[in-house]
Image (cartoon, rainbow, N blue to C red):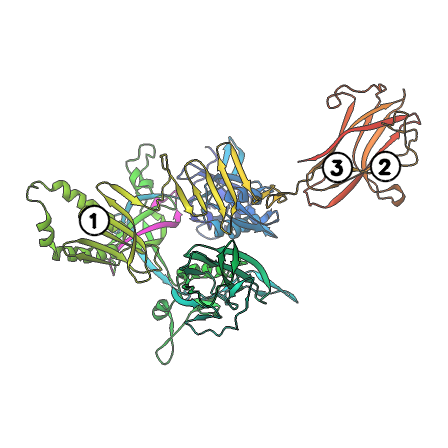
Amino acid sequence: MEDAKPIFDDSWREVINGENTFTFSLKAEHGKEILEGYFITFIDDEGHRQLFEIEEIEGRHDESNITNFSCKHAFYELQDEFAPDMRPRRMSAGFFLNHILQDSRFEPGTVHSLGSETMHTIDQSAQQALHENLIDVLGGERRARIAMTGQQITGRYIDLLQRRGSDTGKRIRFGKDARGITRTIDMDNVKTLLRGRGRGEETEDGFGRRLTFAGIEWSTGSRIKASFEQSNISMSTGEDFETNHVNENFGIRSPYFLPHQNETLTFHFDDSEYRVGVWFYDEEKEFREFAGYRTSSPAAVQTGQSGYYRFSLTKQQDGGVIRPGDEDDAGFEIQRSVTRNPINKPLGQDYVEDNDALQQFGRKNSNGSRRHRKGTFEMSDADDPTDLLQGTLDALENAVKPNVTYVVDYIDTYELESDQEDNPYQHERLLLGDTVIIHDDEFVPPLLLEARLTERDKSFTNPENSRGVLSNFIDLHEDDRRLRRIESTLNSKEGVWDDKIPKFVENTQWLEGKINALQNQLIASGAYQQAEVIPNQGFMLENTDAQSEDFGALYLGPGIFALASEQHSNGEWNWRTFGTGKGFTADEINAGRIRTALVEIYGSTNFYWDGDDLWAIDPSDSERYARLRAGELYIKKGAITIERPDGFKVVDDGMLTYDVSVQSADPPLTGPGVQFNDSGYWYTTETDRSQTCQYYSFEHKARYLNFRCFLYVDSGTTAHVTIETGVHSNNDVEVLASATSTNTDASTPSNPDNDPRVRELTVDLGVPDGEQKSVYLRIRSSNGGRAHVRTTRRWLNG
């Protein structure tokens, strides 16, 4: 290009979900015609066109005579666009992104599936809503780009990807493509104790107090036995119960019992004639519901609600129900089992803590003890204390980790090659978001890290000036150390393994390959904590850290392997997945796609697919369910809710709220200037002032109100028909829809819906709100001649 200007000292800085800027310099004589507000565009490494707006120009009047330009990506204009307000609702990333961008010049581009979550917007910019309400909730990584045809911008797009870049396998080595590596450890944001705060709770003064989880008690597991006798229920923990209530209707009844949250009560009784009734009361001991009878042993009750329980024991005999007598041996027992939780949290404590992190990162007191680094985790949309507790615990897991970053001054070998079309260094190409391996034996301690390029500064004119910041790293040396510990254990049993190899095996090179592959797999997993060789049986790998995502065990023995992801109460592994030479056995399989028949798949006992039908059953009522099969959705006892895109529920818990009828007054509510004609089917007027023909009422549960009217007039007259609200005497009349006709043919139409003499009036009522509303049908004559109207149909839709 003739007017192309030679730029220098250029740097394109981009951070994942963060800064995106471009700076460059020109000689003053080349930059004098370039002003703030001009745009810079180029095609990036991925083939996408980028657009930057010049926001700042700095001219230097010295020997260098240089002008510096600072630009921001066009994406930043979303800071100046409002995101339309939306009340909290569950939605996907694509739906929410489309909503917040609808009033801007940008639109959704490539949007990956990120699940759905409850999100909202209120008084926010589009950029703020994108990051705080979408990316922070559902995850994903933003990419902005534009499309151009010639010199014309034809599209501005925001992509939301699962992740940017890929796992390239590229190694960055000091001395090869890395000039220097700087490690920074930042402990400013480390917290070893977090208290949780949820949605504001309404008080007498408004929303002043925030939800906490102080009322939640978590235990990592307990089991208590209790005996149920004719006069009382005595717990081994020594709770003081009130005297039992006993009557003929309910048999033997226990006192009020306040269980732990998420506690399971299991009833065991010997006699098949017994039955146990479960009664639920609120926190004031007011009866709320009867939870049914349990007639077979063992029977379990999950105490998910907050409140008191009572239990009754009756005996079924001779077709009736009687109270067990003194001579009966109930043989009755209750087992209390509290759901296993990840931590112990006492009742009343509104925080969670990590004592291991306290010893490592806590501040020292004068006596040598450690003080917690404390912080507050806010989950403003949390209205359930248990969800808030789990969210705070998840946040603490990340808060105890110092922010460690590595700044790498690397040489972009790919960019140094002038022939980009036939570049021999394609494998060296490095894009934002790529995962690489950093290798530096001269670093102290030596580095072997897997990390992502999360930010970079790229120079087009001087590729050797490019640099990057790598984070989200994994120390691969730690994997090596773990493998060496296992290798040492295996070597100590080498004789045992040798004795187990059949004597007729001569060539074991193929086995060596298999072993090497398995060793590589062990390196990649890196989650085990210990390995044990079991003499004459096999060996076992274990991760006994219950807080780890890889908690579990693997056993390998002659002709069998077994996997476990949980332990019994006695600490033994609960083996659930097995493999032998005859096949595999597992009660849970995670897979992207399974092709098979005659299969039953269970999400739980209340949600499963039996090969033909998909079932979802109410845990508290087995007669309340939804069944889905090809060509049929069957809902029993309600259980379905359908919500329109604008938020209005047309079906709520199986009940229709969608009443589309339009009711008319009976007898007709007509004005003084309107009368019925001889046939009694027409409203007729001779006045030129709008007159009421009829009054109609309806519930605003659809978007549009429609009237289909048939009109005719005397020759030379025009009929004006309107749908209105308000009355003339109050001067508050509003015309919602209108139509005119000069038709003089009064014959009855054979097909009223398609007759050309019919006029259709449609009123946009706005977003439904379910409120009762009303309108008037009115008519007038243009010149005193007679005008007639009748309605053939009226309805709501949309």
User: Which sits earlier in the primary sequence, circle 2 or circle 1?
Assistant: 1
* Prevailing secondary structure class for the magenta stretch in the rendered image: strand
Reading the chain from its start, which is encountered first: label 3 or label 2?
3
Residue at the far bottom: name it: 367
Tell me the SS state at disc 3: loop
Residues drawn in magenta: 445-463
Q: Please tell me the numbered disc located at residue 738.
A: none
Give the quadrant of the N terminus: top left
Q: Quadrant of residue 380?
A: bottom right
Q: Position of residue 779 (x, y in %)?
A: 86, 32
Residue 662, disc: 3
Q: Amino acid at mark 1?
A: Gln
Separation of disc 1 and disc 3 at Cα? 74 Å
Q: Is residue 40 above or below residue 719?
A: below
Q: Are marks 2 and 1 in contact (CB under 8 Å)?
A: no
Q: Residue at x 33, y 53 (%)?
A: 408
Mark drawn on residue 667: 2
The C terminus lies in quadrant: top right
Question: Percent x, y for residue 207?
Answer: 62, 63
- The residue to which callout 1 is attached is 519
What residue is at 29 percent from the left and 44 percent from the top?
A: 585
Does 458 appear in magenta? yes
- For label 2, the SS is loop
The Cα atoms of the two marked residues, 2 and 1, are separated by 89 Å
Query: What separation in Å lies between label 3 and label 2 (alpha carbons)?
Result: 15 Å
